[in-house]
Image (tube, rainbow, N blue to C red):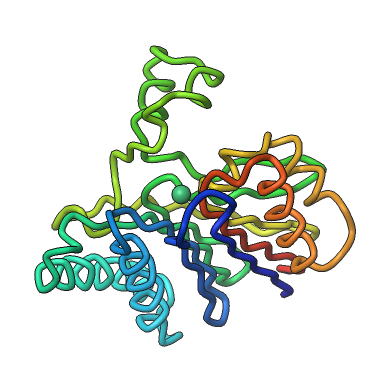
């Protein structure tokens, strides 16, 4: 397995509220929400707590427990630090286990699969605009530039009982996975992302290239990208 990761504050934000992490076969990205520096705190806590839960005995059970522990830890921190009240974070997690990719996510950070020359989105954003698109009251194009596109319907740390979504698929030779925050997908079309993943080269080079492209398109938000290949 090979992987590459890159995170960048982008061109307009004073700080980086995204975080990423990796332990053994688990990869994570998180995008914090909250005023001042609270979002930064929330995403960092989430990554640390989930990675700490992965002891390797029962990875799937530990992953689920990690999400819950992270939720608790974010809430406890906010309770003790009123300036962090209401903070939360997205998390997208990708775990390789027994020839499968296990995906867990909450919020609008995404997991993509590049397979057979096509980019496929494996997660569904937990966001207001995604709901409206699914109900048919908004087109994909309208969603893209909607003023409320960053409003989430689910996040870690914002409720006592977070609704994390889980999925699983069998790995195939040649699969390339991408985890990213909305700072990437807000700037680049899926065709552009696909064209980078289609190239030869190390995942680190692809991760850096994607971040660079997002910045060239405006870099309005923090950008975080993890690319994993050679998975079977
Ligand atoms: Ca973001």
Q: Residue at x 18, y 54 (%)?
A: 86
Task: Tell me: residue 12, above or below residue 224.
Answer: above
User: Residue 211 versus residue 204: which sits nearer the camera?
Assistant: 211
Please give left or right for residue 232 compared with residue 44 in the image.
right
Task: Tell me: residue 18, above or below residue 123.
Answer: below
Please give left or right for residue 19 compared with residue 97 in the image.
left
* Farthest top residue in view: 137
Residue 60: % across, % down: 41, 70
Residue 49: % across, % down: 33, 77
Residue 209: % across, % down: 77, 56
Q: Residue at x 53, y 49 (%)?
A: 12
Residue 211: % across, % down: 68, 55
Number of marks present in the image shown: 0
User: Residue 146 versus residue 217: which sits nearer the camera?
Assistant: 217
Identify the image quadrant of the N terminus. bottom right
Task: Tell me: residue 139, above or below residue 200.
Answer: above
User: Residue 146 versus residue 230: which sits nearer the camera?
Assistant: 146
Q: Residue at x 28, y 54 (%)?
A: 34
Please give left or right for residue 151 compared with residue 113 in the image.
left
Task: Tell me: residue 116, above or below residue 203.
Answer: above
> What is the quadrant of residue 64 in the picture?
bottom left
Identify the image quadrant of the C terminus. bottom right
> What is the quadrant of residue 172 in the picture?
bottom right
Q: Residue at x 59, y 64 (%)?
A: 7
């Amino acid at each position: 397995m090979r992987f590459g990761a890159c995170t960048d504050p982008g061109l307009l934000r004073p700080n980086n509220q995204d975080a990423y992490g990796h332990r053994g076969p688990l990869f994570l990205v998180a995008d914090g929400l909250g005023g001042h520096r609270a979002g930064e705190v929330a995403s960092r806590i989430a990554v640390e707590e989930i990675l700490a839960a992965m002891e390797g005995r029962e990875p799937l059970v530990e992953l689920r427990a990690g999400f819950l522990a992270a939720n608790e830890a974010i809430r406890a921190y906010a309770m003790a630090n009123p300036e962090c009240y209401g903070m939360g974070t997205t998390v997208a997690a990708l775990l390789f286990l027994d020839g499968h990719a296990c995906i867990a996510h909450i919020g609008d950070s995404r997991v993509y699969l590049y397979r057979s020359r096509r980019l496929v989105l494996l997660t569904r954003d937990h966001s207001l605009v995604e709901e409206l698109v699914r109900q048919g009251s908004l087109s994909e194009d309208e969603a893209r530039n909607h003023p409320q596109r960053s409003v989430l319907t689910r996040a870690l740390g914002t409720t006592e009982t977070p609704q994390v979504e889980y999925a699983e698929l069998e790995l195939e030779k040649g699969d390339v996975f991408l985890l990213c925050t909305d700072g990437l997908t807000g700037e680049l079309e899926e065709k552009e992302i696909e064209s980078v993943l289609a190239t030869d080269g190390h995942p680190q080079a692809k991760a850096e290239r994607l971040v660079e492209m997002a910045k060239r398109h405006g870099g309005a938000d923090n950008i975080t990208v993890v690319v994993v290949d050679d998975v079977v």
